[in-house]
Amino acid sequence: MTIHAFRMRLKPGVVDEYRRRHDAIWPELSALLTESGIHDYSIFLDEETLSLFAVLKLVDGNTRDALPDHPVMQRWWAYMAPLMEVEPDNRPKEWPLPLIFHHA
C-alpha cells in the first residue's frame, strides 16, 4: 500500500457547494474508487488559499491510472468543474505533494 497526496484549488465562493457535493457522493463513484484500489481518501481545505489537500491510500496493483477513461469519473469531473481549477478535459488540476515526514 502506498500513500498519495496532492493539492487542488477551488474557485472563490464555492466551498459549501463543494462540501455538499462530496457529502452526497454518487454511490457508483464511491464503488469505482474502491474497486480501483483507493482507500482512506480524505480532502482537507486551506480556507485562506482555497487549496484542497488530498491524501489517499493505494493498494498494490491499483488501477487509479485508468480512472480518467471511466465514464463515471468523467461525469463527476464535469459536475465538479465549475467549482475548481481544471484541465481542458475537466480533470481537476493536481499538484503532487512529496512525502516529507510520516509517523506510523
Image (cartoon, rainbow, N blue to C red):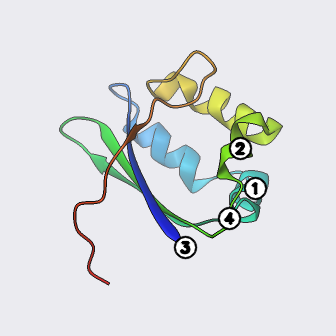
Foreground tag (4 vs 1): 4
Kindly indicate the quadrant of the structure image that contains residue 27. Answer: bottom right
Q: Residue at x 66, y 26 (%)?
A: 78
Q: Residues within 10 Å of mark 3 (few under 14, many from 20)?
A: few
Real-space CA distance between mark 4 and mark 2, rounded to the nearest whole angstrom: 11 Å
Amino acid tagged 1: Leu
Task: Say which quadrant the N terminus sits in.
Answer: bottom right
Amino acid tagged 3: Met
Query: Which residue is label 4 attached to?
Result: 37
Query: Which residue is label 3 attached to?
Result: 1
Which residue reaches farthest top?
88
Task: Say which quadrant the C terminus sits in.
Answer: bottom left
Q: Residue at x 38, y 32 (%)?
A: 10
Q: Residues within 10 Å of mark 4 (few under 14, many from 20)?
A: some
Real-space CA distance between mark 3 and mark 2, rounded to the nearest whole angstrom: 18 Å
The reply to whether dot 3 and dot 4 touch (C-beta < 8 Å) is no
Where is residue 24? Give x, y as percent: 63, 53
Q: Residue at x 31, y 48 (%)?
A: 45
Real-space CA distance between mark 1 and mark 3, rounded to the nearest whole angstrom: 18 Å
The circle on residue 67 is 2
Q: Which of these two is toward me, 60 or 47?
A: 60
Amino acid tagged 2: Leu
Q: Earlier in the sequence, mark 2 or mark 1?
A: 1
Real-space CA distance between mark 4 and mark 1, rounded to the nearest whole angstrom: 9 Å
Left or right, residue 104 beside residue 88: left
Where is residue 8? Give x, y as percent: 39, 37
- Label 3: which secondary element: loop
